[in-house]
């Protein structure tokens, strides 16, 4: 039997979907309202395009910037996620204990080598030097041919992550060109 007065609950509408609550039942059988702060955003870069590629020098750790101003960027489904969640190309979470699913994509091309790799690091801390995630990918296509890279992972918000945010960095074994950068951020847990 439920102890919720259903007649007092506000009907969900398109207008109030970002402030929606959900009803949960805890292990002890208690029912309560909890904010539903999930949601996702997709930000696509308008600065580095096929006509204006970003040059990345070999073995140089470079902050991956995404301005989110391309026409297909969307925040329509963000629910409780703040619009500045990716301000200054830095993930700026709301609270310790949150969890985010991240998809980072971009196009990349190299000039010469057949043994080139790209490494993506996620850094936190006051100087972003504490690496909490790393992924390395071989650029397998021939020289001058575009590779499309897709990085996916889950990030858990710790105290230093919450205080300073997190940044994505790229380092490549050869000089490369980078463009068509985009990020999807989905908050999957809110404490």
Image (spheres, grey):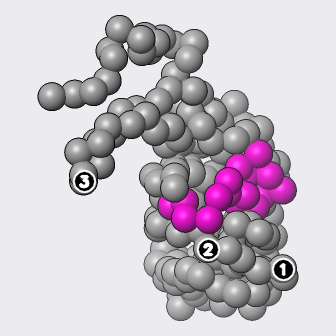
Report whether residue 45 is seen.
Answer: no
> Which residue corresponds to the image point at 77% horizontal and 58% vertical from the top-left?
89
Vertical comparison of 147 with 38: above or below: below
On the picture, is 158 further left or further right than 174? left
Report whether residue 121 is seen.
Answer: yes
On the picture, is 32 further left or further right than 83? left
Q: Which residue is mark 3?
A: 27
Say which of 174 and 79 sits in front: 79
State the predominant SS element of the stretch in magenta.
Answer: loop
On the picture, is 46 further left or further right than 23? right
Q: Earlier in the sequence, mark 2 or mark 3?
A: 3
Instruction: Indicate the quadrant where residue 81 lies.
Output: top right
Q: Secondary structure at mark 3?
A: loop
> Which residue corresponds to the image point at 46% horizontal and 12% vertical from the top-left?
10
What is the distance, in whole Å, between disc 3 and disc 1 at their CAs?
Answer: 39 Å
Residue 162 place in picture, x, y as percent: 70, 66
Q: Which residue is mark 1?
A: 126
> Which residue corresponds to the image point at 66% horizontal and 90% vertical from the top-left?
173
On the picture, is 107 further left or further right than 91? left
Say which of 18 and 145 sits in front: 18
């Amino acid at each position: 039997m439920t102890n919720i007065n259903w007649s007092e609950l506000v009907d969900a509408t398109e207008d109030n979907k970002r402030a929606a609550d959900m009803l949960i039942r805890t292990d002890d059988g208690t029912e309560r309202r909890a904010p539903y702060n999930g949601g996702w955003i997709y930000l696509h870069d308008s600065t580095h395009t096929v006509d204006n590629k970003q040059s990345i020098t070999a073995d140089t750790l470079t902050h991956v910037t995404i301005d989110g101003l391309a026409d297909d960027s969307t925040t329509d489904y963000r629910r409780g996620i703040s619009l500045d969640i990716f301000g200054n190309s830095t993930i700026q979470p709301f609270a310790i204990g949150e969890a985010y699913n991240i998809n980072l994509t971009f196009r990349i091309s190299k000039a010469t080598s057949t043994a080139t790799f790209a490494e993506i690091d996620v850094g936190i801390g006051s100087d972003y030097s504490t690496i909490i995630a790393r992924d390395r990918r071989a650029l397998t296509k021939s020289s001058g041919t575009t590779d499309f890279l897709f990085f996916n992972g889950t990030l858990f918000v710790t105290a230093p992550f919450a205080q300073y945010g997190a940044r994505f960095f790229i380092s490549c074994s050869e000089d490369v060109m980078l463009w068509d950068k985009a990020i999807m951020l989905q908050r999957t847990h809110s404490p």
